[in-house]
Image (tube, rainbow, N blue to C red):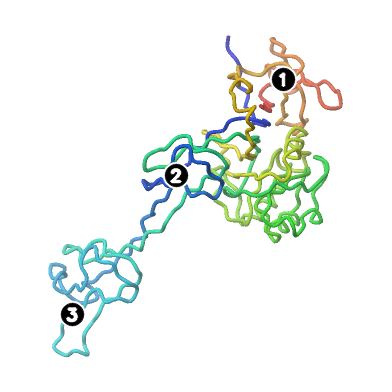
Amino acid sequence: MAHAYTPGLTITDRTILRKKRVLPLPGVVLVKRGQAVDPTTVIARTELPGKVHVLNVVNQLGILPTDIQDFMLKKKGDEIERGDIIAEDRPFIAWLKTQVESPISGSIESISDVTGQVLIRENPAPLNVMAYVDGIVQEIISEEGVIVETTCSLLQGIFGVGGEVWGPLVKATETPDEIMHPIHITADMCGAVVFGGAYASWDVLQKAKDRGLRGLIVGGVDAQDLNTLLGYDIGVAITGTETIGFTLIVTEGFGAIPMAQKTFHLLSHHVGRKTSISGATQIRAGVIRPEIIIPLRRDADESSPSNWKNTKSREGIAIGDQIRIIREPHFGQIGKVTALPADLQTIPTESHVRVIEVELPNAAQIIVPRTNVEILEG
């Protein structure tokens, strides 16, 4: 039987997550299989090659390229410091001597007797990859990294900016539909991941940055405020590398949209716990969602697989599923699927589409095209 694809957001109170943590280049893995790690544990290290600088030595000395080796004071592979003399000529009058200094610290990459150029590479920059979450190293990927397994609550957002951060989870508002104001951001939230409310204004975003928050999770923001925060218009490329002072995750969309009850209640249940978040988002092919990971303690009586719920592969939308409407006129509202009519129906645009019947929190029954919803999985 064929099923219509319906996109979904994961919001689950307990799951086993396997995070692949790898280097961009081959390097050294620093942990062992079975080792317990926390977000700050360095699991692998490598060195990124430095930038290459070109020196036209023959032009500076007024010599032929074929003679360059006779005037070099340093050879290929030598380490040098900024200001070191790497080449000089030998005039009859000493004070007419011309010397070529290195503009950087690094090493001699190559000396060409064809072009007369010397390539100098900056010193490599060390790069560490951290575990990002509390967990156990389940697999070692030789010279690349590891796979870390963690038992956690997992929530996905709609959109985010900023990289991987972690800190204690702090609640800023008492209800999911409350508008967040600057007064909700206090000095004791420095270093924390803060959540709450339906909307964060520009003043809230600015105060979150000033107070040193690690992360801010909110129902909605203004698109123009986001552009102002970034300093440029956001595009369709992947996010997550922005340096705005904190990581921002939007759980519902743009504008004032109450945070989903399920999301708010799950976050409220874990207030005080160490939480890892990432704002990385890609909305094109190869979808990447911003994520909120709250590691849980696995008690002895929970360690057996028999005590865990089996996760079945989803085969389309089903009656009873929680969904979010992602198009007007009910954009952002959460509801429950009550019926899945098999026949095509005509909608106000006069298109003939498959629809679902949805019950809203106020008990209202509405009909929505299936393409206008996403499943809240978990």
Q: On the image, numbered disc 2 is attached to which residue?
A: 31
Q: On the image, numbered disc 1 is attached to which residue?
A: 350
Instruction: Point out the tag, 1 or 2, that comes first from the N-terminus.
Output: 2
Q: Residue at x 75, y 43 (%)?
A: 255
The image quarter containing residue 377 is top right
162 above or below 366? Answer: below
Q: Nearer the viewer, residue 322 or 372?
A: 322
**Label 2 vs label 3, nearer the camera:** 2
Residue 73: image location, x then y, percent: 20, 74
Q: Looking at numbered disc 1 in the image, what kind of residue is underneath it?
A: Glu
Q: Residue at x 59, y 37 (%)?
A: 289
Res. 10 mark: none
Callout 1 crowding tier (Cα within 10 Å): few <14, some 14–19, many ≥20: few
Q: On the image, numbered disc 3 is attached to which residue?
A: 89
Q: Please, what secondary structure does the residue beneath circle 3 have?
A: loop
Residue 338 lies left or right of residue 36; in this view the side is right
Instruction: Point out the tag, 2 or 3, that comes first from the N-terminus.
Output: 2
Q: Nearer the viewer, residue 235 or 376?
A: 376
Residue 284: image location, x then y, percent: 55, 35
Residue 106: image location, x then y, percent: 33, 66
